Image (cartoon, grey):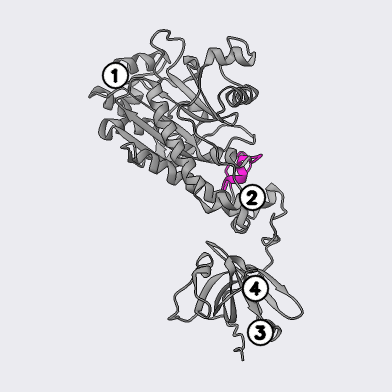
């Protein structure tokens, strides 16, 4: 005879260790198990009821008799603790379900979510998902989107560490704009002007003088008035800087190895399996095309200073068609379109030793070789009509010897959006910040 179900609002210590949903299939039939998670869905049939419990690893099925079900008063998304018997059932997730349960409500819901999280698709518009983000991210497929980003960050760190890099953390409140004073968020910092960092560029360069190779995962801020599906005012940047290079091609190879590690980590994730993700193949060498040749290839005017989105798409199609690659690097952008610290192309200073990496027809990475001699920085800053004194803290590293170096930055959200084919970068951003949104 089965014990009656107990539904309470209190929690008590248990001698039985918690079992995660993904571990339930390893439990021998007849073993006592304890689950903790959210009530994902309840299904009441004539002869039996099912509670689907969700935790961080997946779903588990709990079976109740009609009498047992009648005593359970918990709505979907209530937090439950379930202690019962592991019972083999090929139809259950993982082939094992829980029977004869004792159920404790650890935290009840106080109102409906307005989202059907148990459905394969949450059935909500993007604004609804963003407005209800704390709950919407509980949907397994939604959660998997960020799990891909999490895997990509692990892969980035692993890839850079394997190449001798040290992880650093740099300030996000800075005294100078990194690239353009028109695109920074200004702050009143205890009565002094300051800015939210556009990138860790200045600091990661300085740390090349300490560690030779450095990387960072952190937020960056761009006060750009873009209202597009590919831009955010705050995003996660995967930054790297490496010393003792010959030119930007060395940086591109470090990037290739790092992207390969990111893709490997993504491919090994549960999220990739859940989403049925088509993981890209990273080639042994990225196809490379010079900017001037890229313009000719896409039929753009030869004096065009940058690539338009349509040009990027056309280049992506060319790389896939001609090289079988979903990646292509465009090198040699005009110096007028690059920051002052960019190293010019030695044989023609009109062009730069820089690159963008396109992934599936969209810019994913910007990188290149930097200036490393102090005199070159003085000349470059003066040519901008600025005083080197304004950059004194930054320039002190170059006064004391810096190796030839370069680096890159990957936009995490853009990488994930491209992986899953999202129509808007906000779909893969936990709490996006843009022209119109500063909450939740």
The first of marks 4 and 2 along the sequence is 4
Mark 3–mark 4 Cα distance, whole angstroms, equals 11 Å
Relative to 315, is 101 above or below?
Answer: below
Question: Which of the two labelled residues, at mark 3 and mark 4, occupies the earlier sequence position?
Answer: 4
User: Badge 2: few (under 14), some or many (20 or more) residues near its Cα, within 10 Å?
Assistant: many
Circle 1 SS class: helix
The residue that mark 1 highlights is: 374
Q: Which residue is mark 3?
A: 68
Spatial CA span between label 3 and label 2: 38 Å
Which of pointers 4 and 1 lies earlier in the amino acid sequence? 4
283 left or right of 87 in image: left
The local secondary structure at tag 3 comes to helix
Per the image, the residue denoted by label 4 is 51
Q: Quadrant of the N terminus?
A: bottom right
Q: Say few, some or many: other residues with alpha carbon within 10 Å of mark 3 (under 14 / 14 to 19 / 20 or more).
A: many
Compare marks 3 and 2 and give the one earlier in the sequence.
3
Read off the residue under disc 2: 130
* Real-space CA distance between mark 2 and mark 1, rounded to the nearest whole angstrom: 47 Å
């Amino acid at each position: 005879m089965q014990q009656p179900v107990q539904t309470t609002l209190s929690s008590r210590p248990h001698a039985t260790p918690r079992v995660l949903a993904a571990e339930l299939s390893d439990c021998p039939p007849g073993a006592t198990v304890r689950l903790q998670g959210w009530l994902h869905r309840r299904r009441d049939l004539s002869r039996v009821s099912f509670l689907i419990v969700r935790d961080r690893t997946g779903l588990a099925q709990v079976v109740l008799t009609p009498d047992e079900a009648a005593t359970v008063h918990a709505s979907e998304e209530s937090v439950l603790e379930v202690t019962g018997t592991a019972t083999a059932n090929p139809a259950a997730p993982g082939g094992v379900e829980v029977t004869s349960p004792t159920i404790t409500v650890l935290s009840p819901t106080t109102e409906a979510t307005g989202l059907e999280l148990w459905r394969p698709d949450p059935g909500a518009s993007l604004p609804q998902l963003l407005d209800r983000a704390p709950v919407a991210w509980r949907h397994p497929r939604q959660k998997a989107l960020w799990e891909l980003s999490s895997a990509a960050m692990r892969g980035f760190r692993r890839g850079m560490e394997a190449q001798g890099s040290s992880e650093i953390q740099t300030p996000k409140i800075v005294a100078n704009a990194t690239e353009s004073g028109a695109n920074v968020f200004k702050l009143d910092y205890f009565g002094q002007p300051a800015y939210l960092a556009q990138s860790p560029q200045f600091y990661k360069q300085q740390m090349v003088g300490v560690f030779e190779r450095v990387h960072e995962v952190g937020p960056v801020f761009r006060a750009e008035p873009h209202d597009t599906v590919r831009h955010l005012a705050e995003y996660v940047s995967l930054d790297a800087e490496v010393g003792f290079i010959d030119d930007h091609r060395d940086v591109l190879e470090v990037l290739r190895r790092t992207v390969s590690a990111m893709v490997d980590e993504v491919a090994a994730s549960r999220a990739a399996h859940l989403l049925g993700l088509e993981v890209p193949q990273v080639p042994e060498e990225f196809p490379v095309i010079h900017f001037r040749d890229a313009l000719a290839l896409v039929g753009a005017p030869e004096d065009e200073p940058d690539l338009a989105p349509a040009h990027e798409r056309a280049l992506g199609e060319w790389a896939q068609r001609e090289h079988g690659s979903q990646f292509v690097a465009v090198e040699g952008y005009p110096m007028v379109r690059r920051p002052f610290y960019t190293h010019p192309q030695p044989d023609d200073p009109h062009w730069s030793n820089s690159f963008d990496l396109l992934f599936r027809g969209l810019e994913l990475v910007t990188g290149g070789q930097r200036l490393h001699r102090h005199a070159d920085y003085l000349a470059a800053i003066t040519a901008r009509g600025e005083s080197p004194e304004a950059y004194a803290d930054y320039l002190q590293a170059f006064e004391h010897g810096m190796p030839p170096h370069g680096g890159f930055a990957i936009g995490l959200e853009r990488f994930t959006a491209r992986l899953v084919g999202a129509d808007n970068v906000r779909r893969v951003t936990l709490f996006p910040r843009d022209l119109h949104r500063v909450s939740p």
